[in-house]
Image: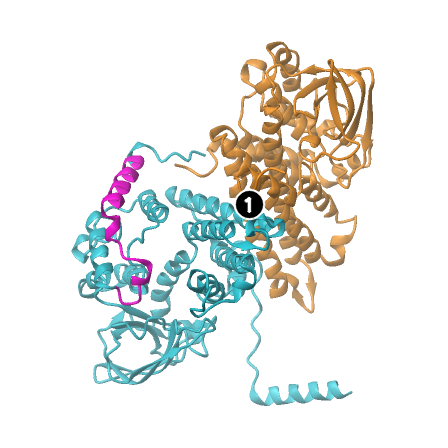
Amino acid sequence: MDFGLSQEQQMLRDAVARCLADTCPLEHVRECSERDNPVSDKVLDALQGLGIPGMMIPEEHGGLGMTLLDAALVAEQLAYAVAPVSFLASHVLAPLALSEAGSEDQKVRWLPKIASGEAHISVAISETVEARDGAGVTCRGGKLDGTALFALDFAGADAFLVADTTGRLHLVPANASGLEKIPLMTIDRTRSVGELRFAQVTAEPLADDSGFTAGRLRDAGRILLAADSLGAGQAMIEKAVDYSGQREQFGRLIGSFQAVKHMCAEMAAHHEPCRSLIWYAAYAYEAMPEDVSLAACQAKSHTGDVHRFVARTSTEVHGGMGFTDLVGLHYWFKRIGFDRQVLGGPELVRAEAAVLQGWIKAA
Amino acid sequence: MDLDYGPEYDAFRQEMRLFLKMHGHRAPTGQARAARPSAEAVEWQKLLIEHGYTARTIPRDYGGYGSEPDILKSRIIAEEFSRAGIPGGLANQGISMLVPTLLELGTEEQKRQWVEPTLKGEVVWCQGYSEPGAGSDLASLKTSARIESGEFVINGQKIWTSTAKQADMIFCLVRTEHDAPKHGGISYLIFSMDTPGIEVRPLKTMTGHAEFNETFFSEVRVPVGQIVGERGQGWFVANATLGHERGMLGDPDALENRFQALVRLMKEERIGMGRAIDNSVLRDRLGALQAEVAAMKCNGMRILSNSLKGEPGGMAKLIVKLQSCELAHQISALAIDAMGEMGILYSGSARERMRGTWQWNYMFQLGLIIGGGTAQIQKNIIAERGLDMPREPKLPKISGAAKGTADMLRQKQGSA
């Protein structure tokens, strides 16, 4: 029995943290976030050196064959540095989908290239979480029609993995005829999101997919968004504590005022159990697949609530400076805001959890 | 991460399940676990000690089971009692606070005299720490003891002495060194509640019950040998046990049990046309609490693993008292809301649900948020020890004259 990280996991986490501390200072984040495609080649190259793009790809396809908990630790560090790189969809969800449901040919075609950094697949599964009017992709006679919103890791994608209205997943090359790609501007300029419009686009379904895989991706995506939020929250708490240990008012460090101390203590008290919950959910992804959906809902919804509180409280501890662009606290604030909404906000996810455990029947 | 306990522990768990299956019917019911354990509760306690399901690591010479400490086995024992809904060993203040203190710091004679009868429920203790003027700032306590012909002579008042009415004995902090700095002038005494000069008055709380008392000491004479540790070391002796108390208030199994009771309530309770759980707002709150309970359970497993590896609990441990007490309170709050107008019924009223348990919990748990280190003191601890934030600078003591001047100035400014 060991509820904690292995030595290898601690080393992975520390290596990614060091790599990002060296290559991804806030000034670099600022530069990247002002571009249409925020992805930093410099940071991505550095992560390539650690094998991160292939971390979820089986060894026989050129990757490291790691677990979702490993990926959660990386996501946490990426958010801690507000790193403008593609990761969640391109290097976790797409490899998972191909590994779990792709044909041998699909795996051979894509996985080695993803691992080596030559290819990058964006994932659009938002409609399996939150179907709304005017969105949704249908598949009839091998052709895709309709709209998929919120394709993640959108910019520079070579292909898209898209869920249809039955939850089945399809691979679509970026240059497919009849595919229109519209970038969406979000609050979080460190990650790239877009909309896909399909008009009679030839579909290539994942081979062994009955709609089950989209659910697996939803679980994994929620856990990693929670982990991302955890890293951003950690950074915001540390920044609040640091700032309050330097800033003086009324002849005292503001951190010696209980009003400020209690704000920081409340952030830490809510934040720390999230870490344990996320580790558990990520571990469950491989070790207890029957439990993972509920754990993923809990991690996503609880972290979403806790870190909204952390984001605003840390900003308040910084006083007026927290509100400025100069200090740049808003990069983390917005990252947390993004993580909360994508793949279901807390209320929506809790409603799903209630059905999962039979509290009510599905609507 | 590996949540598997392994074959040795799985076997231990199976053994315990078998024990509970065979003997569970002999366990006392909840109400029998009053301050003074019933004959039934004492018998159950003895049976549990015999099988090592309580007092497990206490040496046999002192009436325990005498096993090596094994955190995982202790955890399994707690989990299995909780899972079966059967009460575990007695967990009164004597057992959870005094016994560990004596084992750590008591003399051989004190251990022999007190540990076994306390474990077996024959001697009931109460705790004399807080005073009307010494709550969060416990070390400023004023109950005094002077030495006179080989005896401590105690005068003063304690408050929040739960079970003082039933207790045979008290472990009590008193000021013995009047010239020493406040933390260094305290001694830890143990004495009989039958000693002349002790008066116990019940302290009725907002729940309508007297779960606590006020205890008054007037020229109470106690032999000088009835001290644990040296004179003036009482603060450090007591801190050994405060740690045990904080651990006691953050049991994730207890949170899980209360949460499950809340789910059952919300499935049974009907408001209007549907069950409480059919109401989407109440259900959302239920889901939010469930995630928090899950987070605290995971946090508990993490602390457990840290201690298995000999690592400090760190932030994960510092936040337990604050978060668990608040969460327990929120669970009761939702239960009351789920009952709608029925939620107000209390005091054995007609139509009352579960003997008013949820209302009592809701009020009593507010007491627990305050007791054992208030939420605000917990936040100071988290900030200063966990986040390394600067301490509040100490203000110079204001003399009476200076205070008068300051008040006058304030009045002038106010009127200007």
The quarter of the rendered structure image containing the C terminus of chain A is top right
The quarter of the rendered structure image containing the N terminus of chain A is top left
Taking the spot 35% from the left edge, 61% from the top edge, the residue there is: B240
Does dot 1 land on a helix, a strand or a loop?
Answer: helix
Picture coordinates of residue B206 (x, y %)? 47, 73
- Quick one: label 1, few (<14), some, or many (20+) residues within 10 Å? many
Task: Name the residue carrying label 1.
Answer: A274
Is B138 magenta? The answer is: no
The overriding secondary structure of the stretch rendered in magenta is helix
In the rendered view, does B292 fall on the left or right side of A144? left
Q: Is residue B90 above or below residue A39?
A: below
Q: Which residues are magenta?
A: B9-37
Rendered orange, the chain in question is: A
Task: Looking at the picture, tell me which residue is in the foreground, A142 or B216.
Answer: A142
Picture coordinates of residue A139 (x, y %)? 73, 19
Q: Is residue B275 above or below residue B218?
A: above
Q: Quadrant of residue B170?
A: bottom left
